[in-house]
Image (spheres, rainbow, N blue to C red):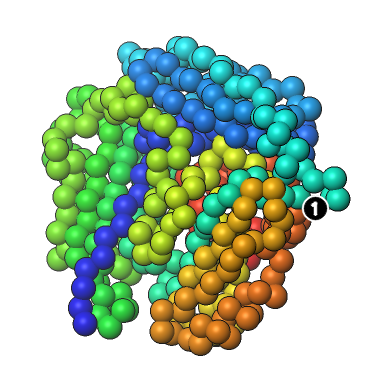
Amino acid sequence: MSYLFSSESVSEGHPDKVCDFIADSVLDACLEQDPNSRVACEVLCKGRDVVLAGEINSNALVDHEMIARRAIRSVGYTYEGHQFHADKVRVTDLIGKQSERISGGVDRTDKQLGAGDQGLVFGFATRETPELMPLPVTLAHRITRTLAAHRHQGEVPFLRPDAKSQVTVRYEKDRPVEVTAIVVSTQHATDTKQQTIHEYVREALLPIALGSWFNPQAKVLVNPAGPFDLGGPEADCGVTGRKIIVDTYGGAARHGGGAFSGKDATKVDRSAAYFARYVARQIVLRGLADVAEIQVAYAIGVPDPVSLRVDTRGTGDDHVAEQYARRFDFRPASIIETLKLDRPVFRSSTNYGHFGRNGLEWEK
């Protein structure tokens, strides 16, 4: 059976990703001083305004406005004449403290950490790439990551921070065989000709980013809506948590619905999703299946999951894979200890997918 499957990626300068990065920067700043910080940080960016909201319980003394400006600067929004500028944005801080009733239910007196909320998560792994990730989202991330590298290194001076990519892959018998279509939209300097951008994408960006998967016969669309000189939060409102499919498996696996950024590891919609990915990887690495999807569900304040299920999609024995998965301790305190999630590691996970990248504890 032949079919096409597409996934997308967005750059660190995409409005929603700017918000995610600010939120994770605030989280890491708290964890640097207090590993027991409880953080739920939400961010909205539009025009010249940055709004921080949510709840934080921490002994850390953090200048939220300074952290936000540093994050915006590191992304690259420092262009004169633009409203959204690291030094010119107006930062409104609406962060409060977590309800004592919630924290009391999570931080149990018997030293067992309860789940920070009810919810379900999915972890996924597939043998179709060395990263054990679906190929379409892996290639889409390579494109946006390469765009960012060329911009930060000054190799392509007309590039600006906001960008998106989309890759379509043709599968035969559930195995990827070729890239058939690519969409690249990148913000650029105002005086840049579209032909210049098209030539850069086709002749430089794609061969580097896609490597052996580069297909000269693939359909390539570059800035299909026309000039893209106005971008980022100046053009579109950004909010944390709106890129949950980009952050995970590009739609190739199910998603529990919970976003990641701005949340400490007691929030199982982040930490348990990381751990489910970790366990799914172990199932595939040990040859129990070529594909593994794990669902785990929790109740707020309760350490042990209320359910666990493994689906190998016909590539292994579901029962054997599930019995193996049940050897792992899915309680939040154990997850935090195993993956070392009480450290300031979250800022490094924000962009270009939370999975399939080296240097992340849950990818080992």
Q: Is residue 215 visible?
A: no
The C terminus, quarter of image: bottom right
In the figure, 207 relative to 146: above or below? below
Residue 58, percent from left and from top: 74, 29
Instruction: Name the residue at 52% across, 65% down.
Output: 295
* Picture residue at 33% right of the left edge, 62% below the top: 136
Rendered position, 72 above or below 273: above
Disc 1 on helix, strand or loop?
Answer: loop
Residue at 18% x, 41% y: name it. Answer: 223
As drawn, 111 above or below 324: above
Numbered label tally: 1
Give amino acid for label 1. Answer: Gln
Q: Compared with residue 128, is residue 187 higher up or lower down, i.e. above or below?
A: above
Which of the pair 213/21 is nearer the observer?
A: 21
Q: Nearer the viewer, residue 338 or 32?
A: 338
User: Within 10 angstroms of label 1, few (less than 14), some, or many (20 or more) residues?
Assistant: some
Q: Residue furthest right?
A: 110
Left or right: where does residue 238 sit relative to residue 323?
A: left
Q: Position of residue 22 (x, y in %)?
A: 53, 31
Q: Which residue is mark 1?
A: 112
Quarter of the image with the N terminus in it: bottom left
Left or right of 316, for residue 190: left
Q: Residue 210 occupies which quadrant of the picture? A: bottom left
* Residue for point 53% across, 56% down: 120
Q: Quadrant of residue 338?
A: bottom right
Residue 47 in the figure: left or right of residue 108: left
Does residue 102 appear to the left or right of 124 in the view shown? right
Q: Position of residue 249 (x, y in %)?
A: 42, 59
Q: Position of residue 51 (x, y in %)?
A: 48, 20
Q: Is there any visible trace of residue 299 in the rendered image?
A: yes
